[in-house]
């Protein structure tokens, strides 16, 4: 699952739509998603993107300007997009209020196209976005998005540990010693856990016994190496907040209880507290913020 909302924007003058792009990004961000835009200056450039099935399959929305300079007009572009992707959502727009976009689309008999003049473009995009992601904004699907996003961060932690180990030879022995000390401690914990498991009276008690060198331990190891290397200590609070506030809520989602009521499903955490849509939205935003911070600190 991903937090990106991918838009192919066909526009030959990006400066004219920069304010709309910023407003659209802000709207999407409030729901815990990140706007990712690939601009194409012509219909020809757009079809190059669309011909790449790996990229094209991940486009969530196509924005197509009518007047694209000397090349093909936007109505031709819309037809080509629809031929390539029969069910891709498209918004066809123009900066000229006198341009009859709906008539152009009707004449070419292209189904499923939204039209807008540039001043209303943001509102139309917001409506289409809400419709597209409504199915993932319900609690059950949001659970999958959050767990997928945190798994992505787990992988970033793993790769960052490896890179820091290679980059700081003077810290390699102490880093390995941290792991050894933790393993010794866990060995004792595992022995106690095995003794406890031998005493259980019901199989449901097995849920209480799950011990490995966990993602939380790898995360703590990373913060210790960062501290020893004097790296990114100005962001220490963000890392502590992620570990203390986000990771536990993510872990709760792995142990939720689902209560069905007709077509609806309510989710409850291990303490019996209902997980609401607002809580999931806030969690997506926190995940997105930390993911972007992590990328800015460790991306090569």
Image (spheres, grey):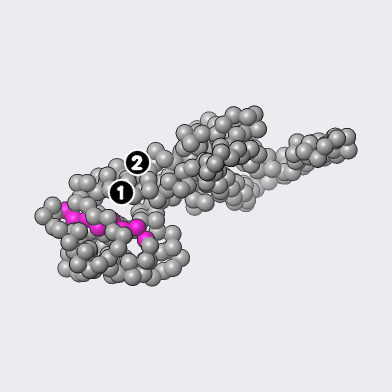
Query: How would you classify the magenta stretch by its main secondary structure?
Result: strand
The location of residue 5, given as percent across then percent down, is: 41, 51
Count residues near mark 2 (Cα–Cα under 10 Å), then give few for <14, some for 14-19, many for 20+: some
Q: Give above or below for 89 relative to 298.
A: below
83 or 225: nearer the eye? 83
The boundaries of the magenta stretch are 88-95
Marked residue nearer the N-terminal end (2 or 1):
2
The location of residue 128, given as percent across then percent down, is: 34, 49
Question: What residue appears at the point 79 percent right and 36 percent down from the top-left corner?
Answer: 205
Q: Pointer 2: what residue?
A: 27
**Residue that protrudes farthest toward the front in the picture:** 262
The secondary structure type at the circle numbered 2 is: helix
Q: Which mark is residue 125?
A: 1
The location of residue 223, given as percent across then percent down, is: 61, 37
Q: CA distance from mark 2 to mark 1?
A: 10 Å
Q: Which mark is residue 255?
A: none
* Residue 236 shows in this picture: no
Question: What residue appears at the point 77 percent right and 38 percent down from the top-left corner?
Answer: 204
Question: Which numbered mark, 2 or 1, is in the foreground of this view?
Answer: 1
* Residue 113 shows in this picture: yes
User: Decide: marks 2, 1 in contact (CB < 8 A)?
Assistant: yes
**Residue that protrudes farthest toward the left in the picture:** 98
Direction from residue 97 to residue 85 in the image, left or right: right
């Amino acid at each position: 699952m991903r937090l990106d909302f991918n838009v192919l924007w066909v526009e030959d003058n990006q400066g004219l739509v920069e304010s709309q792009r910023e407003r659209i990004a802000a709207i999407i961000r409030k729901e815990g998603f990140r706007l990712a835009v690939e601009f194409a200056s012509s219909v020809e450039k757009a079809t190059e993107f669309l011909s790449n099935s790996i990229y094209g399959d991940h486009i969530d929305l196509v924005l197509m300007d009518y007047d694209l300079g000397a090349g093909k007009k936007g109505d031709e572009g819309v037809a080509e997009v629809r031929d390539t992707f029969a069910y891709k959502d498209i918004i066809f727009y123009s900066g000229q209020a006198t341009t009859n976009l709906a008539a152009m689309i009707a004449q070419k008999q292209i189904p499923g196209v939204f039209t807008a003049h540039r001043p209303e473009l943001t509102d139309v995009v917001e409506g289409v976005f809400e419709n597209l992601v409504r199915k993932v904004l319900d609690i059950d699907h949001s659970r999958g998005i959050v767990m997928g996003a945190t798994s992505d961060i787990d992988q970033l932690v793993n790769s960052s540990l490896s890179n820091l180990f290679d980059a700081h030879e003077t810290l390699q022995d102490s880093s390995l010693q941290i792991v050894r000390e933790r393993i010794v401690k866990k060995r004792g914990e595992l022995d106690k856990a095995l003794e406890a498991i031998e005493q259980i009276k019901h199989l449901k008690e097995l849920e209480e016994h799950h011990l490995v060198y966990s993602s939380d331990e790898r995360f703590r190891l990373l913060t210790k190496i960062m501290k020893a290397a004097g790296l990114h200590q100005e962001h220490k609070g963000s890392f502590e907040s992620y570990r203390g506030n986000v990771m536990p809520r993510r872990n709760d989602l792995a142990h939720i209880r689902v209560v069905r009521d007709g077509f609806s499903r309510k989710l409850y955490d291990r303490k019996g507290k209902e997980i609401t849509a607002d809580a999931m939205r806030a969690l997506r935003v926190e995940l997105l913020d930390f993911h972007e911070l992590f990328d800015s600190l460790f991306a090569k």
